Each structure stands twice: as structure tokens, then as C-alpha cells.
Image (cartoon, coloured by chain):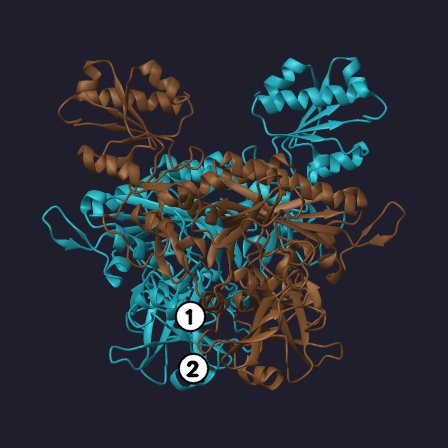
Chain colours: A brown, B cyan
Amino acid sequence: MRLSQFHLRTEKETPAEAEIISHRLMLKAGMIRKLAAGLYTWSPLGLRVMRKVEGIVREEMNRAGAIEMALPLIQPMDLWEETGRWQKFGGQLLKIKDRKEQEYCFSPTAEEAVTEFARNELTSYKQLPINLYQISTKFRDEIRPRFGVMRAREFVMKDAYSFHLDAASLDAGYRTMYDAYTRIFTRLGLKFRAVFADTGAIGGTASHEFHVLANSGEDALAWSDGSDYAANVELAEAVSPGARPAATEALRDIATPTQKTCEDVAALMGIPLQRTVKSVAVMGVDADGNDQFVLALVRGDHAVNEIKLTKLAGLGEYRMATEDEIMEHLGSEPGFLGPLNAKKPIRVIADRSVAAMADFVVGANKPGFHIAGVNWSRDLAEAEVADIRNVIAGDPSPDGHGTLGIARGIEVGHVFALGDKYSQAMNATVLDANGRAVHPLMGCYGVGVSRIVAAAIEQNHDDAGIIWPDTMAPWTVAVCMINPKNDPAVTAAAEALYEELQQRGIDTLLDDRGLRPGSMFADMELIGIPHRVVVSERGLAAGQFEYRHRRASEAESLDRDALLVRLGA
Amino acid sequence: MRLSQFHLRTEKETPAEAEIISHRLMLKAGMIRKLAAGLYTWSPLGLRVMRKVEGIVREEMNRAGAIEMALPLIQPMDLWEETGRWQKFGGQLLKIKDRKEQEYCFSPTAEEAVTEFARNELTSYKQLPINLYQISTKFRDEIRPRFGVMRAREFVMKDAYSFHLDAASLDAGYRTMYDAYTRIFTRLGLKFRAVFADTGAIGGTASHEFHVLANSGEDALAWSDGSDYAANVELAEAVSPGARPAATEALRDIATPTQKTCEDVAALMGIPLQRTVKSVAVMGVDADGNDQFVLALVRGDHAVNEIKLTKLAGLGEYRMATEDEIMEHLGSEPGFLGPLNAKKPIRVIADRSVAAMADFVVGANKPGFHIAGVNWSRDLAEAEVADIRNVIAGDPSPDGHGTLGIARGIEVGHVFALGDKYSQAMNATVLDANGRAVHPLMGCYGVGVSRIVAAAIEQNHDDAGIIWPDTMAPWTVAVCMINPKNDPAVTAAAEALYEELQQRGIDTLLDDRGLRPGSMFADMELIGIPHRVVVSERGLAAGQFEYRHRRASEAESLDRDALLVRLGA
């Protein structure tokens, strides 16, 4: 592409509204423009990058045997009511009435629509397994759209759905997609990690997330330094630290007039934070369906994992207890809560690490006081024990090999083994080899195509701008001409090089705008072209081109042949 | 593609709900499946065809220098209010409220959104001309969606928008798009015609429609046999037939007790239909803005052109007169209306051909009577004369060369010279060479990508199914194996041919499903593969393949080399 025949408009100023680096750089580079909250126009530059991502996703999906199709974006309410998701999906579902007052939604995902297709098209086990996918615009009505295209309302997603006769086939199909995703993110040149993940609202039996690693990532990932174990912190198991030591201290009240946090109490007492226990009061339901007051205990240096908590009996839809409920059950205000001396019978759930503690400190259920030297069995009944905390760096890996570290990631892909959740709800069946109607098992597999563009920038940038991996770059090489008007030989040499690189299949940009070198180089760096070649009068006189990789600190002089080698041409 | 690894599901039955052949064949071939009224799932087979069309459209747009981008599908009300189209677009605009009760629409076209982009991005005449396009899903909330994807609510459209400093540049840009469209439809292998068209609701100064010719087309097109003149009948000028003959007959009442139509009156009187005049009563407004009763006169064998009528003063939003209004002004019931003996002063508009008539017959404004021997000036005042009728076959071409014929067409493309309608309304300006802010002139250019698929079928089918032009076909060649299980050599030869054709860049389908020849051939004919090669034991023994073009009545035996030549490999 000759840049004079393209539309590029970079900005000098850093846009004030952008909170994260990818959003700032996409605006500065002119890749996107905001039309309304969470709605972005993709400029020609931005779209080039998105199409490169889309192309790699499509190639790898096809290579994996998936078959592309296209489901309507607008989908009728009836279909979503069959699975109950018309209600369950919540406010993120953009609901629409047409001129006849019929209700529809703008599809945020397409399990219902693809199962509708499948229940009509798939009738025999001989048609299975099959994996159907589409790459299309999706919509989620985010409460607070932000971070540019990272959390936009309108976005581009690849969504695939597989159908299987049995669990072994689903496992194989799931693995095929896992491998395809690994190839996709590898080809995109991104540092990424696949982690065990919670199946969440979509439901199902197994799930992995693919994360682009970046310090700004919204997700915390736990990974082992001694194995390939990796999981979202939401899910990563915190193993028991082992046997409980014997009690050595006596129970005693500690005056903590203003110390309401474990940190403050530990500092006052001069003990490690690991000796204190945090009490979190929540409301669940008991076996009879009545409200149940629950005290969840985690070590002072740990945090309650809300998702793990929801998996315990009666806590599926728990909420935080109110101050009134806390007063009613414990007789204290927050800040001094603990499992001893409750006013009413309560359910106590101790994290595995709390269950392994002796001589610990808890709130006294008395304003201004904590209790030290607490020991299980001696001072309070053994509690229900469960894994209810987030793992932290240094925890042992749950697979028994190595120690966990914590990394930050941006979720860009997700594979789910759904089982028969949707085929049951929508009564999709096929006949098996014995002529019996069975519900096929399903998997679903998403890639956030537009989000990958932003995630790649979060991982790959410097003060000058974006640094694209070669495969995602709008152009792989930029050919820049210095003072072309002064010397027609510069133009001729640049044009010849441009034509040659294009012919060799290297996607090349010829910067023929006639800008001064400083402005031209600043633009090429901002928009992240990985390879820059400068054609100048002086260089030509010496038979040399100036080559610089976007990550290199220095340029090098190369003759034509060496340059072609360097560019892989 | 090996068909065993694809999803194809053809239907034996002709679907009852489909009114037109393309809809029936797309359902039978399994290209689309209905999800809800006007909403279609594109199966893998259907999507392959749509992607071929999309690919050719994209290549020709790029070749013409247009630059691809992507505007949001969901667009805020504010933007559409700037041009007044939030109201004016009418019920076809799908309006949406988000969770915060903000109003949006699902874009049916994107003049506003692209002008918003342009008014921020384009600041100098040096950036002009520029043509920005996208290929994306659009939505129109049709009152009566029908004919499958021909008039669906959700559809895929290529929409392009050009910006120019002056009229000469707009003309050149318009011509560039006209030529690109000509290449697109030529490459798609379709018989098409570009015609002058009405600019309609989008507005503007010049417009051509591109129609795929098909007997089932909704549009009537007039074309000259003596020049390249062609126009939508909505717009085609009906020229004056020349000087009026002298009066020869006396005015006289004719009793027409049950004859209410020109046809019946002409039959009763034994005169040609061309001697009668039809009177159509409508209501417009006069110069003061009051209701005005208007009688439009066309020859008995002609039809009033509603669009031409709306272009006359006071008739911009005319409606048909009610029976009460007719009685009030003419004193008669419908069926016997005419311009003589009105009860009140009325406005009479005579079509050019009526103005050139003598001794004609009109209704008498008296139930059961017509008047014959009517002559202008002698019997009634000379009327306002205008072109208010549809041209018919045999009319002289308005460019003075040849005679008009009428063809039926399906509109698949439209180019508009918009002028400054949108840049004015939205105050988009650029600085010209003198530093003055000017509103750029715009053009807009649409191609109905999904509609082309259906239109191509309307034009290209037979009793056995679809007949794709090579460039649109899901696969160009089908390689069919006869009884592969009986003879491994058949499989081997078919596989080898398949691999060779694929390597030579010919998109080939290998039908490896193991069906009986009849079923296999019926499927290949139904889904319209243009070239079929049959590999059989008997053929191989003779060193021959059986080749048949989809349009050929007979198959031929060809050896490998002759086959490759025939397939252009």
C-alpha cells in the first residue's frame, strides 16, 4: 500500500479519556474512533490489524476441521426462552422490539441459534462430530463500557460450537480446539497462557481460558514453576498446608480499640499477619430454604474467593450480611467479628489453611476487642472445612509439583465442554447407532477477535507507540523515503524495493507522503510497523539501506541482499 | 473440500412457504434456514457462495482505490437526528433502547456514521478525494419480509461513501464506482444492466441502479434497442408523440351502463384503447397549502407513474382522492370520471400523449355515461401538460435513438451522487486551497451482497436446481466417485484428480460420501456446481473421465489432459 492512497490520521496529544495504554495508543494511532459509549468505528488502519487476526483465526479453525457458517445477529426471544437465558443473561442482553412489537435480542453468543440449526440439520450420529463456527459482530450491553475495544459493547468474536455423540468424542473435540487456539496465539506472536477456568454462566463441565499475559490484565492467573499447571485464580485450588500444630497459648482478650483489620491487629500485637484470621459474614440459605448466617474464615493474609464460596451448599447465590444481620447473630459491629461467642447458632466455614492453624487471633464479637490464643476443639467446635480462598504467590501447586506464581492476563479465548445443557433444554436429538434418540454433547469455543488487537498492544508497546508482532501488523515493513523531492533516485529506489517486497509476499507500506523524517518515523513507530527501511540519498550512494527493527535501539546499514535476508524475503 | 468433512443437507421436498424460485432453491439446497421472519441462518454451503461474492466486491473496491473500514452496527439516535432521518427513515429503522434508556438504531445504511468519521478525520482538501467502504450486516425492519434473503430484514451490504472538493471530482469518483460495479457484475458472470434511477429517500443529484436481469424481478427497466440508454421505468422519460391531429368528430354522450374501465368502453365502442383517456383523481396542495383536487389524465393503454407525479408542484405527498371528494368535485362516482363538466374548479394535468390526442373518449362525470369526440381547446381548456406515465415497450427512446423495450430486473447495486446533503446537515467541512471551510460533496454506493446470491439464482436455474456462474459457485468443480468401495482405484484416481485441481487453484469438491450416483448427481445439480467430473471403474479402464457442464445436456468422455484444458486448469 502506498500511504498517500490510504487514510492515516495519527494524533500528537494523548487522549484524556483513555485509561489504559492500548486504548490510548489505538486512539493516538487513529485505529479506532469512538461513536458512542462502547461503540467504536474501526478506521482503515485498525481494520487492517483486525483482519489479520481474523485471517489467522479462520485458517486455524478450518485446519482443525471446523466449518464456517453465519447465524443471524438478531435472534428471537422465543429461542432464548427455551434455555431460560432470556432472563438469566441479565442486563447485558440487548433486547429489541421490532415494528410488530415482537421481541428479539442482539446476539452476545449463539448457543441457542446454533442448537436450533443443529436440531433441524443433524439427525444421525453419522453426522457427528461436527464443529460449526462463525466470525461476527456481537453485542453486550455492558453497564460500564471502558478501555476502548477491550470492553466495548459491540465487538467481533469467533464463536464455535461442536456436537458429539459421546464424552470421548467431546473430549477429543475439546482438545482439537485447545490445540487450534494454541496455534492461533502462537502464530499471532503473543505471550499467552491457557488456564483452567470456571465454567460460569455458560455452564458445562470443563473449561480453559486463553490469556494474553500483560501487567494490566484484569485476571489473575496462577501458574506452577514446577509443572504446566495453570489456572485462573478464580478456580486455582489452595491445598491444605498440612497438619495442625498443637495448642501452646492460653485464650485471652486483646484490647484493639481502633484496630479493625487483621493488618492493624497483627501490627499492634507484633505478630505475623499469618497468625490472624479474617471473618467474613455472608447470608446463604439452609436446607429448608431459609436465610442462613454464615461466617467464612480465611487467614489474615488471604482473600475470600467468591466463586469458590458459591460452590458450597446453600451459598450458590449468597450475599454479604447487613450490619443489622451481623448485630443480630454476633452481637457486634464489623471489625471485631469472630467465630466465638456468637449470639445465635451460626454456620462457620474455615478455609483449609485456617483449619490447620493453632494459637490464632480472631475478633471477639465485642467492639474494641480481639481474642488471641484461639485453638480448634479446645475453644470452639471444629468447623466445616473447605477451599474458600484465592491462592497467592508461593503457595504449593495443587498438582504437587512446584510453587505457584501469579501473573496478570487478558482473556482472549475460552473453550468449554458444555455437555448436554443446551441440547437437553432445546430437545436437540440425533439417532445413535442403535436408532435411539440421544441428546448430543456440545462444546463451545470463543475467541475475542477485536479484543486480541487491544491485548496485543497491552503486551507489546513502548514510549514511542505500538510494537506489532509481524503476523498482526497492518504492514510488516515500512519503506520510508528521505527527501524524495530532492533526488528522484530515492523515489525510484524506494518504489523498486516496495514492488519487490510486495511481489515476494511481504505486506509492505511505502511512506510516500513526503513528510520530514522525524514526523514520518514517529508515525511508523506509533502505528507499530515491525520493520523499517529508510531509503536516502546518502545511503544509496553507499549502496546501502538503513534497516531497523521496531524493538532495536540502533539502525543498521544493509545492502539489498542482506536486507532481503533480514526481512525474510 | 472433501464433502464428508463438510455439512450439506439438501431437501427432497419443495418448501411450501417459498414464493420465488431462488428462495425455494436456497432452502432445498440447504443454503439458508429461517430463524424468524426475515432472519436467515447461512449454512456452510450458503456462506461459501456469499463469501465468493464478498471477495469479488472487495477486490474491485480496492482496485478502484476505495479503503475498507468498519462502522458500528449500533448507532446513536443523536447522529440520525442531525440529518432528520431518525424520523424520516420511517418504520424500516429498527430502533433500540439500551439498559440506560438511550436510543440507538441498527444501521440500515451509514451516511451519518461515515460523515461523523469524516468531519473529524478530514480537515484539508489534500485528503480528498477519498472513498471509504465497509462490508457488513445491515438491518431494515421490513413490514413484510419475504422472498428469503431477497427481501430479508438482516442482510449483508457493501456500502461506500466518497468525499470530494468539487463537482468534477464527484463526477469522476461516481464514474470510478460505476466502472467498478460494472467489473463486479461482469466478474460475477451475471447478465445485468445499469439504469438511470430515481434518487429516492437518500436524496442527491444523480443515480444509477444495477439490476440483475430476471423475469421475476420486481423492477421494470426500460432500455433502448438503438443506444445504451437504460432507465428504471420509475424514471424513464416518455417523450411527446408529436403534433396533435385536427378535430374531426362531434362531442357526444355514449351510454356505458356497466363499462367503468377504458378497456370495457373501447370494446363497447369498437375503438382502439389508445383513443380513450383514463382519469385518476388525487389530492395535492395548492400554492396556499390548502387541499387541491387534481385529475391526472393518461391514455387508456398507459399507467400513471406515481414517482413522476410526486415531482410536480403540489403533489410531493399526494394521495388518492376519496369517493366523497370525487363526488364533491366531479359529481360522479368512480368509473365515469373525466375532465369535462366538473362541479368545482379542478386542476387537470394531461400526460404528454393525452395532450397530443384528438377525438378522444373520457368519462362524463355522470354515472353510466362517457363522452366521445372530445377535443382540446374546442371542448375543454388546454390543460397543464407533463410526463406522468410509465413508458411501455415500443415507445421511442428519450435520447432519440431507437425504441424502448421493457425488461425485469432485481436491484443489486446503486450509485448515488449525493452532493452536500449530508455534509451540510452535519456541518462537515474541509479547508480548500484558499483556506476556506467548504462542505465536501459526497457520493454513496451500495451493493447488496446477500441479495446477489438470490438474484443470481433467479437468473440461473433449471428444473434440477441452481446453475452457478463459475466465480460465485461454492466450488467450481465437483469430482464424483462411482462405487468407490468396489474399486480402490476409483478412490485413488478421484483423490489424485482432486488434489491436482486444488493445487492448480481450482476450488474443487470431492464427493466422497459414498452415495449412489443418482443421489450424488441430484445433489450436485441442485447445489449448482458448474463443472462435474465423474470417476468410474469403466471410465478409468478406458483412461477417461466423464465431464459435464451444468448447462450441457450430454456428458463427454475426456482423458486427463483434455479434462484439465476443459476446466481451465
Q: Amino acid at mark 1?
A: Glu
The image quadrant that residue B16 belongs to is: bottom right
Between A81 and A545, which is closer to the camera in this rendering? A545
Q: Is residue B252 left or right of residue B478?
A: left
Lower position in the chain sequence, tag 2 or tag 1: 1
Between B178 and A480, which is closer to the camera in this rendering? A480
Question: In the rendered image, which quarter contains the C terminus of chain A?
Answer: top left
Q: Are the residues under marks 2 and 1 on the same chain?
A: yes
Disc 2 element:
helix
Disc 1 element:
strand
**Residue A356 visible, this angle:** yes
Determine the chain carrying the residue at label 2: B
Provide residue B32's location: percent of width, then percent of height. Answer: 63, 50
Determine the chain carrying the residue at label 1: B
**Residue B527 visible, this angle:** no
Residue at the right extreme of this rendering: A434
Task: List the residue tagged with mark 1.
Answer: B103
- Using the numbered discs, state the Cα–Cα distance from disc 2 to disc 1 in whole angstroms: 44 Å
Provide residue B251's location: percent of width, then percent of height. Answer: 39, 73
Q: Is residue B215 left or right of residue A563?
A: right
Task: List the residue tagged with mark 2.
Answer: B326
Q: Is residue B309 above or below residue B149?
A: below
Where residue A406 is drawn, which disc sits there? none
Q: Is residue A244 left or right of residue B154?
A: right
Provide residue A404's location: percent of width, then percent of height. Answer: 57, 46
Q: Amino acid at mark 2?
A: Ile
Q: Is residue A72 above or below residue A334?
A: above
